[in-house]
Amino acid sequence: MDFASASRALPEPITSASNPLIKRIRGLGSRTGRKKAGLFLAEGESVVREALMACCDEIEEIVISSSFDRLDSLLENLPGESGCPPVKVVDDRLFKEVSGTETPLGIIALVKLPQNNRSRVLALKNALITVACSISDPGNLGTIIRTSLAFGADAVFLTRGSVDPYNPKVVRAAAGALFALPIIEDVDGKDLLNEAKAAGIQVVSLAASGDKTLKEVDFKKASLLMVGNEAHGIDPDLLAKSDLVASIPIARQSESLNAAVAHSIALYEAADQRRKTQSS
């Protein structure tokens, strides 16, 4: 379906900071505002393209700066039958004020917050699930979500205390993966581990003092892969409830790995084991 013509009759640019749309965008800058409105912001051409391809029907509105000139190409060949979301234009000066980046990217989508079912995820056959335990850095969480999609994880669970996955910085770092992967937030870690074990899912925690290396873990089984907070790691109570604690061997001169990097290495190992099983 070709929606390129959607940009040919655009409204006049909004120039007033008191415009309801501008107030709405500003409100979505906070976690409370996002929860209240049931929306989050996806900013930048590549992220908006991913949103359009994955969940066009869930985009409430697209907002562009008056100088943004690539809307036609962005709206070509979209999936679905609902048509192009409404498009509003904002004066460049005002767009810069509401943009979440130092250098405005010219386009923002207002996307509905998804409602994901944790029980359905845990019931998946041979599930591979990432658990981000109190990850506080938006860049790290975005990278963890992006890596989870790239290496075949079925979902990402976030324990309480984690940064909001719909924080604009997380959305940009996740590079569209948020639209393709179930994200289950505000999870009680102990409850999740109990549910996972009841579902026959092994719990593997990453820690420097692991009793096994990644190569010794059988990721061909249904697995919950837990990665800890950047400064404090995984809560000791959750480590104690894990089936396995795995470490990544590193050079003696190096103190530790970044949380997102450690997760990427571990998830690659899991994906590699599963690929080899499928091809044999």
Image (cartoon, helix red, strand yellow):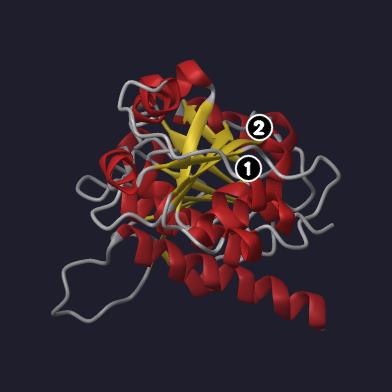
| Labelled pair 1, 2 in contact (Cβ < 8 Å) | yes
Q: CA distance from mark 1 to mark 2?
A: 6 Å
Q: Residues within 10 Å of mark 1 (few under 14, many from 20)?
A: many
Q: Earlier in the sequence, mark 1 or mark 2?
A: 2
The circle on residue 91 is none
At horizontal 40% and vertical 30% (from top left) the residue drawn is 25
What kind of element bears circle 2? loop
Say if residue 245 shows up in the picture: no
Image spot of residue 80 (x, y percent): 83, 48
Left or right of residue 85, residue 146 in this image = left
Q: How many marks?
A: 2
The C terminus, quarter of image: bottom right
Image spot of residue 36 (x, y percent): 47, 16
Left or right of residue 205, residue 18 in this image = left
At horizontal 58% and vertical 58% (from top left) the residue drawn is 71
**Tag 2: amino acid:** Asn
The circle on residue 116 is 2
Image spot of residue 4 (x, y percent): 71, 58
Which sits in the foreground, 247 or 132? 132
The N terminus, quarter of image: bottom right
Left or right of residue 223, residue 159 in this image = left
Judge whether 118 appears above or below 92 on screen. above
Which sits in the foreground, 160 or 15? 15
What kind of element bears circle 1? loop
At horizontal 39% and vertical 48% (from top left) the residue drawn is 170
For label 1, the residue is 182
Image spot of residue 231 (x, y percent): 19, 48
Say if residue 145 shows up in the picture: yes
